[in-house]
Each structure stands twice: as C-alpha cells, then as structure tokens.
Image (cartoon, grey):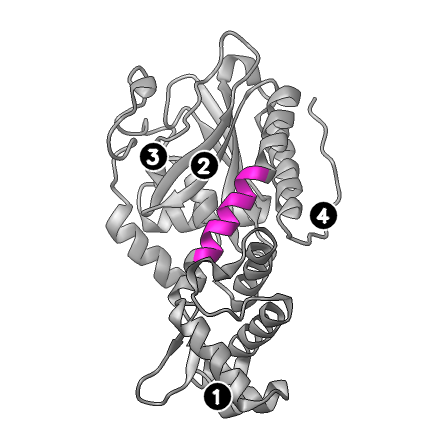
Amino acid sequence: MPYQHLLMCIWQLARVRRMADHITAPRRNSSGLARDVEILEILGSVEAVSGGGLGVSRVAQITGRDKAVVSRSLATLADAGIVDRDENTLAYRLGARLYALAALTVESTLTRESQPILRRVAQRARETTHLCVLRGGNVLTIASELSPHEFRTTGWEGITTAAWRTPSGRVLLSDWDEDSLARWYAEHGQDQAIVGPVPPHAAGFSVLPSPPPDRQVVADLASLRSELERIRTNGYALLDEELELGVVGASAPVRDFTGRIVAALNVSAPKTRIGDRLEALARFVASSARDLSRAIGFESSHSERPQLP
C-alpha cells in the first residue's frame, strides 16, 4: 500500500478517534497530532523509504523542530506501533500498526460508500448487485443488494469463491504484475468454485463443479493473462454460464485514490432476462464502479454515463 494512502487514512482516523486511546503519555492535543502527522509524512518520503528510515536528528532538521521534542514524538509513536525503530541504525520508519489501521479505514470507507451505489445499480438494472474483495487469494462478497424480481440470482454475502472462476475475481487480479500473478496462479489456479465452508443460505446454490468446456474462460496461466488483458482494455469482465447454469454477469473494478483496484462491483442475472444486453449491462456496471471509485477518492477522467437499453 503506498505511503501516501496510509497518511490519508491516519488523517481520517484522527477525525473519529483520538490515537491517545492506546498511549499513556499526556501529550495528545491538536498541535501534537499535527506534529505527529508531519513526522509520518517525512517517514513516508522518498529519502526515508530508500534509506530504510530516518534518525531523530534528520527528522528534526527537516521539520525545524527541537530535537528533544521530535525524539519524544517518535518514541510515543513507536510505543504505539505506528513507527518502528531499527535497533542497529536507530532510524525510524513507518510501522506495521499503521498499515493495519489504514486497512481498517479503507474497508470501512468502501463499505459505507458502496451502499447507496449498490442500491442504485440494483434498482436501475433490476438485478442482484454485489461488492467483492480479495481475501486469501480468492473472492469474498462483502455486500449484496437483491433484485426486485421474484425470479433472481441470490445474494452471495459472506461467501468465498475461486477468483479464476468469476468475473469479479479476474477484475481484482487485473492490475497485478506478472510475477505476482504467476505465484497466485500456482497456489490458487485450481481452487474449487466455492472455497471453505458453505453458509446455510448458500446450500442450494447450483454451482457447477467445473466450467463447461464451451464456456470456460480460464484454463491455464496463459488464458488468464489473455483475459486480464481484455479486462484492462474493456474496463469490465463478463460471465456467461461459467459458474452457474442460466446465469450471466458483469464485473468492473473499484479503485482507491492511488489507482489500485480494491474491490469489484458485480451484477448477476438470469440469462433469459438479460438476453443480448450483457455488454450494455457491463458498461453500466463499469460506469457505476467508477462512481464508487470517485466516492472513495479516485480521480478519473471518465465522465460518460452509459444508459441501460
């Protein structure tokens, strides 16, 4: 996760919760918080990252603050796990707890901002809509909005599926580098359709144990790479009875403000109802995914609003 992203998350956290909850020193006030954020920004600089951290003297020099004040601030942040101190060089760098706090903040923001968009997509498309993320190399559906039709696809909330079998999974992999993708495929390229325990509400899902030969999109690493290239070109991924008979779907990437793909917006529907409108549905899903991306900070040059036919 880029350091700038972590710093933005720290600002968000500061607005809703004083970081002093886990720190015993009485130094928590607005000026102290501003000083800490300034120090974190410096530790996220190119100089700090490339050099494995910065010492107290260098941080004090950059901030123009008293060395003793900077030393106390760094010590307090280190006690909280926000920064780490190298015992050999005595240099400070951003710490593991900062990453953990940032991850919680990002997912909380994503979940909150996705709700109105999921509802809007489900109402306009009149089909079931999902928000999916990667977990342990596979796809977890963290939110679903059901279609208003009585005959509809089911919500997949809380269910983990194989990334290679689903359009959402392939979207989530579409910004990975080649080496990471190869390692992922070696570990997960043959995972079964539903990974892990099946929740009670999913017991009746008619998931195919393997894709029909004429519907299979990914058969090996090479075909996965080809599919990811199509996704990058088109801006969305399609599903045509690959996971369930009679079910089609479309997925598109949701990006955070750094441009990294953090989720996939998905719509699934009975094929009999979608007919030849799957590509149009996919463009609408992609537009809605860009709306959600902007809501969590992504700046996009795309402003078109595809309409459903």
Residues under labels 4 and 2: Cα distance? 22 Å
Lower position in the chain sequence, tag 1 or tag 3? 1
**Magenta extent:** 101-112
* Tag of residue 200: none
Residues under labels 1 and 2: Cα distance? 49 Å
Q: Nearer the viewer, mark 2 or mark 3?
A: 3
At x 57% / y 52%, what residue is drawn? 256
> Which residue is denoted by mark 1 in the rendering?
56
> Which residue is denoted by mark 2 in the rendering?
167
Q: Amino acid type of disc 4? A: His
Lower position in the chain sequence, tag 2 or tag 3? 3
> Which residue is denoted by mark 3 in the rendering?
161
> Is the residue under label 3 in contact with that under label 2 (CB below 8 Å)?
no
Local secondary structure at mark 4: loop
Please determine whether, in this image, residue 86 is positioned above or below residue 278: below
Q: Amino acid type of disc 2? A: Pro
Residues under labels 2 and 3: Cα distance? 11 Å
Q: Choose between 63 and 44: the one closer to the eye.
A: 63
Q: Nearer the viewer, mark 4 or mark 3?
A: 3
Q: Amino acid type of disc 3? A: Thr
